[in-house]
Amino acid sequence: MELKQLTMEEKNKALDLFDTPVQFRPEALKMLSQQELKLILLMEKECIPEKELEKRIGEAGLARCPEALIASAYSRAVLCKVRDENGGLQYQVTDFYSRFPYYAQFEYEEYVRIPRARRELMNQWDLEVYMSYYEDVVKAKMRGEDVFMHDGDFMTLEEACEAVMKQDFICRVPCNCKYMMDVTDKPRDVCIHFRHDDNSAWDRGHGQRITAEQAVELLHEWNKRGLMPNGKPEEEGGFCNCDCPSCYPIQMAKKLGSQGKYPRAYWQIHWDESRCINCGRCTQVCNFQAFTMGEDKKVSFDPAKCWGCTVCTENCPKGAITRTPIK
């Protein structure tokens, strides 16, 4: 089906409805197809029941198969699912902030065609928006208030493995932070999801289903690369395996000075210099430069820089690094 080309005025109206920042409209036009722009104009801000939306798409001549257009737009996070009071399925247009991570995660080859400088500007903007949503919650945690915040707890390798062994459904998903930032040489497909409900990556058609045994094997592999399990699996429906330069929550925590409180550390790290053989493994996996190696090829440890993620404890071949619970 050949669609009539949109005018620039129509495109701008669609981008307005998509809450697109003016400075990123050229990038947004790469993230949205002609059909999707027309779909946004058709739906505006409405929540539309599934069958009604199919009817409107057909009457507007947007697609020969309305169901396929809806499925594609949902998969690409241009649409989200909304349930009415009776559980009936409705669809609503998302926004640029929602579409951006999916574009980076699942259409990475297209994403990296955008010049690095432009991608960095989008990430700076995205982090600012992210912080505007969650900064107050983190500050509440810093005051000692018992409030929920995603990616709020560092987990040990053992705790992460125990969490996946309890699950019947496990999905491995690309980490949006790592693909958006595009600065790490560590594994990127490292988010562990237990959810498969509306608007989850799995329900949108993404991710790789794995067994608990496969997840445990991956967690050990990622631990050796210095990735930190982070989250409350039961409450969040999964957890991420973070690295410092890519992780939005940790970037926010650094800006707010929430070390120890968010992400919460449960363990204090101890280093026994007399048992250290200066192999440098700890310096390779430490995300916070608490362990460093000097020009004399000797390891040193700065407790003030340690965030208590515990990755180092599993990677010391001589047991020179241990942990004790923080009271």
Image: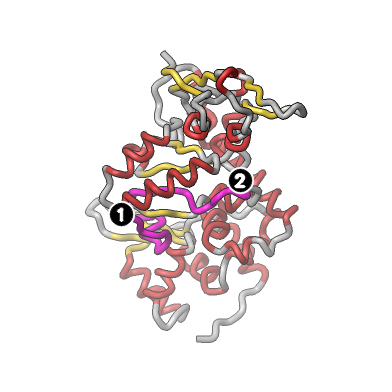
Magenta span contains residue 188: yes
Q: Residue 95: horizontal and vertical position, in percent?
A: 53, 55
Q: Residue 67: horizontal and vertical position, in percent?
A: 37, 74
Q: Which mark is residue 308?
A: none
The amino acid at mark 1 is Arg
Instruction: Kindly give the residue lying farthest to the right in the view shown.
Output: 295
> Which residue is labeled 1 in the image?
83
Drawn side of residue 69 relative to residue 120, left or right: left
Magenta span contains residue 123: no
Q: How is the image coloured?
A: secondary structure
The amino acid at mark 2 is Asp
Vertical comparison of 257 with 178: above or below: above
Vertical comparison of 252 with 199: above or below: above
Depth check: give the residue in front, 240 or 54.
240
Magenta span of residues? 185-211
Instruction: Kindly give the residue lying farthest to the top in the view shown.
Output: 327
- For image coordinates 44% across by 64% down, the residue present is 75
Instruction: Kindly give the residue lying farthest to the left in the view shown.
Output: 86
Q: Secondary structure at mark 1?
A: strand
Vertical comparison of 312 with 221: above or below: above
Answer with the quarter of the image where residue 147 lies. Answer: top left
| Mark 2 or 1, closer to the camera | 2
Q: Secondary structure at mark 2?
A: helix
Regarding residue 306, the answer to whether it shows in the image is yes
Using a 10 Å C-alpha cutoff, classify the residue at mark 2 as few (fewer than 14 neighbours), some (14 to 19) or many (20 or more). Answer: some
> Which residue is labeled 2 in the image?
126
Marks 2 and 1, the one that precedes in the sequence: 1
Gap between marks 2 and 1, in whole Å?
27 Å
Question: Which image quarter holds the C terminus?
Answer: top left
Q: Residue 114: horizontal and vertical position, in percent?
A: 69, 61
